Amino acid sequence: MVNKPKNLQKTKKYLRKVIDDGARLRQYFLRGHGNWFALMFSLINFTLIFYNLLFVNLFFIPEFLKSFSIFFIIFGMIYFPMATVVGWLDFKKGTYRAEQQLTREISPIWREVFSKLEQLAQQNQDVLRTMKSLDKPDKD
């Protein structure tokens, strides 16, 4: 049983801790589910559907290659490198840069961050110019 605090200050502090702990647990769950389990289960689901609907019904594949474990090994050897290459191409030559640019333009938070970064870059240039002018020997 949870001990209930006796005064209002302790109650507020207790409730804040419960809310913070709950939010932290929620974030842990979302990261675990979204980054790991959803990916894993979607890949398993995709391979099972692909195997059952297509691979088993292909007449030109020999019967001894139609076991799921053989299919899974062959699928993994082809799919993961191919998906990695496609992701790299998208990152380097595809829409990734355009998506990031749109995020910078649309999001007020990112707009402010990049505005501040541009101000810092300008201040850095001013400081460098001043330092260079101080390094030049005076002509007397």
Image (cartoon, rainbow, N blue to C red):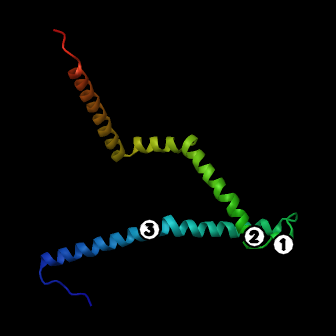
Q: Quadrant of the N terminus?
A: bottom left
Nearer to us in this view, 60 or 103: 60
Image: 16 above or below 82: below
Do the CB atoms of the residues marked 1 and 3 lie less than 8 Å apart? no
SS for tag 2? helix
The spot of residue 50 in percent (x, y) is 72, 65
Of the residues under marks 1 and 2, which one precedes in the sequence? 1
Circle 1 or circle 3, nearest the eye: 1
Q: Which numbered marker is on residue 70?
A: 2
Figure quadrant of residue 44: bottom right
Q: Quadrant of the C terminus?
A: top left
Where is mark 3, residue-wise? 30
The spot of residue 24 in percent (x, y) is 34, 70
66 left or right of 76 in image: right
Q: Residue at x 18, y 74 (%)?
A: 12
Where is mark 1, residue-wise? 64
Q: Pick out the residue farthest to the bottom.
A: 1
Q: Amino acid at mark 3?
A: Leu
Q: Residue at x 33, y 73 (%)?
A: 22
Image: 79 above or below 106: below
